[in-house]
Image (cartoon, rainbow, N blue to C red):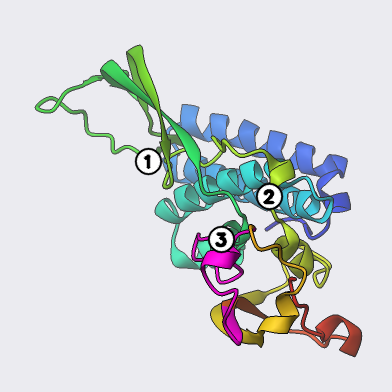
């Protein structure tokens, strides 16, 4: 990284845009002169800066409780990191913090309560290569590989003659942004709990998913017709209402810094 990027204030500095413009200029000059290595290096540097900026913005939205915006930014972070990993060595991938971003993005995504997504179904007449405009066919492909960079440009397959067919509701979408939930009906307390401990996007943390048992009296505020705290999907009165203890999903967060006794205290979710 050529600049310091840690907090949301850093992303607003004019120097960020200036550096990205300079990298784009150098990339175009290198590409036109046939210096593919330099063009590709400029692409990597530029994409890494964009990934860092986006990850910081996603964290800021989490802290501000703008969950849907944070979720969409995290999906883009995932795409940036995957593209950079495929087109760089491990040293750059680590030093640019893209490895950290990819790892932490997946952990943040696991905490979101989103589980249903819209998935469009469609047919495509044909694809063309974004590098050479070759029409891609099963037995007629160009030398460019989808997802790789050539002279500072990422190779994509461009779809043509798209015909929309249907929309399906799925649990494992290709496009994570297509959430069908109403955020007002969902529980984001786990994300809020974690973000309260963190001061910036690049603090390391781990989440360990377990289960923990509590006496039935701890659940006195749970209505009989509500979902059972054990997360079985059944109503409380039909599941664990008459048990002496209830085993519920539990997350232990591990932090790599000193915490105050007040903050470190476990929170019971009911």
- Compared to residue 246, the image places residue 69 above or below, namely above
Of 36 and 250, the residue lying toward us: 250
Residue furthest out toward the left: 139
Spatial CA distance of label 1 from label 2 is: 36 Å
Q: Residue at x 21, y 28 (%)?
A: 142
Q: Residue at x 16, y 23 (%)?
A: 137
Residue 210: quarter of image: bottom right
| Residue marked by disc 2 | 186
- Residue 119 image offset from top left, x and y in percent: 42, 32
Left or right: where 5 falls relative to 89:
right
Q: Is residue 255 visible?
A: no
Q: Label 1: state its secondary structure.
A: loop
Q: Within the magenta stretch, is there residue 50?
A: no
Q: Within the magenta stretch, is there residue 238?
A: yes
- Residue 209 image offset from top left, x and y in percent: 55, 77
Spatial CA distance of label 2 from label 3 is: 18 Å
Residue 29: quarter of image: top right
Q: Label 2: state its secondary structure.
A: loop
Q: Could you tell me which quadrant the N terminus lies in? A: bottom right
- Residue 166 image offset from top left, x and y in percent: 37, 21
What segment is highlighted magenta in the picture? 226-247
Q: Label 3: state its secondary structure.
A: loop
Residue 235 badge: 3
- Compared to residue 46, the image places residue 60 above or below, namely below
Q: Residue at x 77, y 83 (%)?
A: 266
């Amino acid at each position: 990284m050529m600049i310091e990027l840690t907090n949301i204030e850093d992303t607003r500095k004019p120097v960020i845009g200036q550096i990205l413009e300079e990298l784009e200029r150098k990339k175009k000059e290198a590409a036109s002169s046939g210096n593919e290595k330099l063009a590709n290096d400029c692409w990597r540097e530029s994409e890494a800066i964009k990934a860092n900026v986006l990850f910081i913005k996603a964290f800021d939205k989490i802290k501000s409780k703008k969950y849907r915006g944070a979720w969409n930014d995290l999906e883009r972070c995932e795409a940036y990191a995957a593209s950079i990993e495929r087109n760089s060595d491990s040293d750059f991938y680590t030093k640019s913090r893209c490895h950290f971003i990819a790892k932490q993005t997946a952990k943040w995504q696991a905490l979101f309560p989103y589980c249903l997504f819209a998935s469009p179904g469609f047919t495509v007449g044909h694809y063309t290569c974004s590098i050479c405009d070759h029409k891609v066919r099963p037995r007629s492909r160009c030398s460019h590989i989808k997802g790789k960079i050539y002279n500072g440009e990422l190779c994509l397959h461009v779809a043509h003659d798209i015909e929309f067919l249907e929309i399906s509701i799925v649990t494992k979408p290709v496009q994570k942004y297509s959430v069908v939930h109403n955020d007002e009906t969902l529980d984001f307390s786990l994300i809020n709990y974690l973000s309260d401990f963190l001061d910036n996007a690049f603090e390391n943390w781990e989440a360990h998913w377990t289960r923990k048992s509590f006496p039935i009296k701890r659940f006195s505020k749970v209505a009989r017709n509500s979902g059972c705290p054990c997360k079985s999907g059944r109503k409380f009165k039909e599941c664990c209402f008459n048990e002496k203890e209830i085993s519920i999903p539990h997350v232990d967060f591990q932090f790599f810094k000193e915490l105050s006794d007040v903050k470190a205290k476990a929170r019971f979710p009911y």
